Image: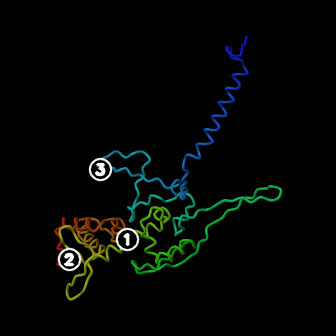
Amino acid sequence: MNFLGGLRTPFSSGLNSVQSIINTRQLSSSLPSLSRHTPDKYWKITRYVKPINETVYEAGQEMPCGVKVPKERSAYPQYEYETLYFKRQNRGLYGGLQRRVTASRSEYLNKTLRVQLPNIRKTKLWSEALQKSIKTKASTKVLKTITREGGLDKYLTKEKPARVKTLGLKGWQLRYDVLKALEDKELPVVRKDDKTIRVKYIHPDGKQFIASKEELLAQLHAHVQNDSYYPIEWAKYQKENVHLSFGDIVEQLEGYNFDFSQVTAK
């Protein structure tokens, strides 16, 4: 009589467990081959970035705990990839290059850690849009890229996501200045008092302003000073209101019934 056919012995249960382990190992070893591994080239930039609070607060809302109100409004838009790792790249054009740590081993397998820093040079780069030379630190890789693409402006204004991630905070601010200068150059040129003047701003109602933003802000400061009992210093007022746009200044001047004939083309 065959007792192995109808009874479950420890030997047969051991074979089943071994077979299940073999099947599991074969399945797990085949999974990486089926999946596609696409590593992020700039993972240290995208992972270790300064957090940005995008919450929109309304007037009269209770101040959340832990939120700090800056004393001055920034003149530049927030940069999503301001890194918290190797912060010096925020002060120059590093092209996403990071500080690397490598290890060398002797014949007795003693490990020695070494730090490799990117090849950075102090240089001056000419900007056609800004019409001035920019003094900054840049890596040799970025300098080669600027030469290949045909100038600093083309390097900064490229729209690829990889370029935006590797600009750094300094490059992001230069990009904003270059784009704003290129936008200003597209404005029309008018003649007033036998002089050729480029328009600085076109209001939605059709007014073409030939005065600069600083000149309009000075006019607004004069009206605010007349309504104030205490003196308001121009330097302090300019510092506190540098964030105001052309449209905001014009809207406030309209509240004072300002005559725009002197600062407009028509």
Q: Nearer the viewer, mark 3 or mark 2?
A: 2
At label 1, which amino acid type do we have?
Leu
Q: Name the residue under label 3.
A: 59
Image quadrant for the N terminus? top right
Name the residue furthest bottom. Answer: 194
At label 2, which amino acid type do we have?
Thr
Image quadrant for the C terminus? bottom left
Horizontal relation, residue 7 to residue 125: left or right: right
Q: Is residue 247 depicted above or below 13 in this figure?
A: below
Name the residue furthest front. Answer: 1
Q: Name the residue under label 1.
A: 179
Q: What element carries label 1?
A: helix
- Please name the residue shown 77% across and 58% down the image: 105
Q: Nearer the viewer, mark 1 or mark 2?
A: 1
Crowding near pointer 2: few (<14 within 10 Å), some, many (20+)? some
Residue 190 — which label?
none
Q: Which of marks 3 and 1 is in front?
A: 1
Instruction: Specify which label sits upstream in the sequence, 3 or 1.
Output: 3
Instruction: Specify which label sits upstream in the sequence, 3 or 2.
Output: 3
Q: Position of residue 121 (x, y in %)?
A: 58, 75
Q: Is mark 3 on a helix, strand or loop?
A: loop
| Viewer-nearest residue: 197 or 60 | 197
Q: Mark 2 points at which residue?
A: 264
Q: Is mark 2 on a helix, strand or loop?
A: loop
